[in-house]
Image: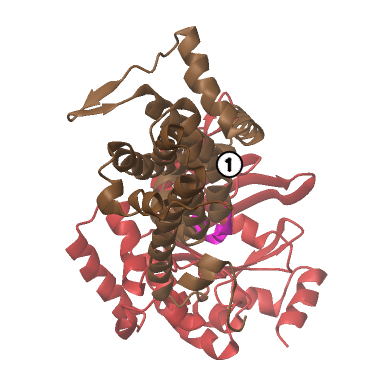
Amino acid sequence: MNTNSNSPTSASDPSIVVLAEKVNKFFGSMHILKDIDMVVRKKEVVVIIGPSGAGKSTLLRCINHLEKINSGHIYVNGKMIGYHEINGKLVEDSERNISLQRAEIGMVFQRFNLFPHLTALENIMEAPVNVRKVPRDQAEADAERLLARVGLSDKRDKYPNQLSGGQQQRIAIARALAMKPALMLFDEPTSALDPEMIGEVLDVMKELAKEITMVVVSHEMGFVRAAANRIMFVDEGRIIEDTTPEGLFNNPREERTKAFLSKILT
Amino acid sequence: MYHFDWALFWKYLWPGTAFQNPLILHGLIATIVVSIIAQVMGVILGLFAALAKMSKLALLRAVADAYIWFFRGTPLLVQMMLLFFGLGVTHIYDFPDIHIWGLTIIGAIQAGVLALGVNEGAYMAEIVRAGIQAVDAGQMEAAKSLGMTFGLAMRRIVLPQAAKVIVPPLGNEFNNMMKTTTLMTVISAGELFYAYEQINAQLFKPFELYLDASIYYLAMTTVWSYIQSRIEAGLGERKGVEKVPGFFERLTGVRTGAH
């Protein structure tokens, strides 16, 4: 590895969970992410905001390699994700290695993506049993604890289509937590929900924010105020601001940040 | 006016008398067994071809495309004769009789199963692919985000959901398969229709005998349609999927009720 261990942003620094260096991403000729640098430290809760099409979700999806990058590096827990370098060139890792790293990164999707053919309990047990090879009874006990934690113990044997959107998203959070991830990624977790269900999901996330490292793409300012340590404003593939919530609300650096904030804060 | 030979008609229809002719009994068994094995082969080949068609590797995609192109683009009858007589004459494979578990599987049956199965795979490939593509892409992403490899995610998450889309056309394919086994008559494979052909060659009663054969095929496809409607009802009931066509709707091809 080529990083300087004295530098405050070295991938080998154990307090750093996510480190992105000069990340570029193209969709065809569209330059989606432009020289992204980003650091997320342990227990930090980072919220990414920005207009649609700015690259927020793409950035998040690069962190667990659901999207490939064209150049730069992303390290999660000190290990480069998705690639290794041969003579300065990115070479995609084996599927097995990528899967092993993804198992340490929980992800919650806008559309929940629960497995519809499995019950709530089975959704949560699926990965621990089949990826981690946890014994079934232990996985079941863990899953029941997680169901209780998201307040849905009574729904354990329900199928996703028997649950409301808010309940599905809470199960999806429990499913991600079942792998005991070091990092949780949330991709617009409340934007597919009816307004009356947003609160129950944010409550679970706020509880979680006290103990786990999180990167959240969301415009829920209630969550930002209650739980975020840092907020990033992304526009046209660049991180325009990277500061505390107070810093952003009180004195945004750029005009476009002000313009955007005025739109979402009303 | 044609004198319909009722006695002969019943003799070769009623199982009690018809099965005394070993040609018919063995032919019926062969038809059922060949249909099942060829269909299973078709599903497996179809699954691999479908996955190959979705592969990142251009070579795999090309092989799958060529396979589907050839076997869907040429007549099954020709494929079967090419396989049996063509391979035989080149001595690549002579289709010798195989003896297992006290059974003798004659070369023509082997060739028939092979041709039917490989041909079926080319059709199943599209059915399986459509089934996989009907599953929301978010399912694969969610599975991957939990650390599943592509294979595990396919097996545990995507294919079980695709099955609901695959099973109805798969059932129809099997229905066709039972009827298509009659093509094996041209390579004297000894399935059910071959039996009636042989008997007719001696007795020359084509109207009665082919009617009997028709009734046997009708019985097999009807029983299968019933089984299929039960399987689909079982697949659908857990999660309240759209109502599956009932048994009679399926037989007649007419959809009743409000849609």
Q: Colour of chain B?
A: brown
- Percent coordinates x, y for residue B53 in the rendering: 59, 38
Q: Seen from this angle, which residue lies furthest bottom?
A: A196
Q: Where is residue B239, by image quadrant?
A: bottom left
Packing grade of label 1 (10 A; few <14, some 14-19, many >=20) is some
Q: Residue at x 52, y 15 (%)?
A: B86
Tell me the quadrant of the picture where the C terminus of chain A can be found: bottom right
Q: Is residue A27 left or right of residue B108?
A: right
- Determine the residue located farthest toward the top in the rendered image: B90
- Which residue position holds label 1? B54
Relative to B167, say whether A120 is above or below. below
**What secondary structure is found at the residue carrying circle 1?**
loop
Whether residue A76 is visible to the viewer of this picture, yes or no, is no
* Residue A171 picture quarter: bottom left
Whether A14 is among the magenta residues is no
Q: Residue at x 51, y 81 (%)?
A: A165
Principal secondary structure, stretch drawn in magenta:
helix
Which chain wears red? A
Q: Please name whichever residue, A165 or B63, is drawn nearer the observer in this view of the structure.
A: B63
- Residue B227 makes an appearance in the image: yes
Q: Which residues are magenta?
A: B133-142
- x, y percent for residue B6: 41, 55
Work out whether B105 lies above or below A42. above
Along the line of sight, which residue is nearer the eye, A28 or A184? A28
- Residue A179 higher or lower than B67, as above or below: below
How many circles with numbers are drawn on the protein?
A: 1
Task: Indicate the position of residue B101 as horizontal and vertical percent values.
Answer: 18, 30
* Chain containing mark 1: B
Q: Position of residue B113 (x, y in %)?
A: 42, 33
Near-viewer residue (B228 or A257): B228
Q: Residue at x 49, y 77 (%)?
A: A227
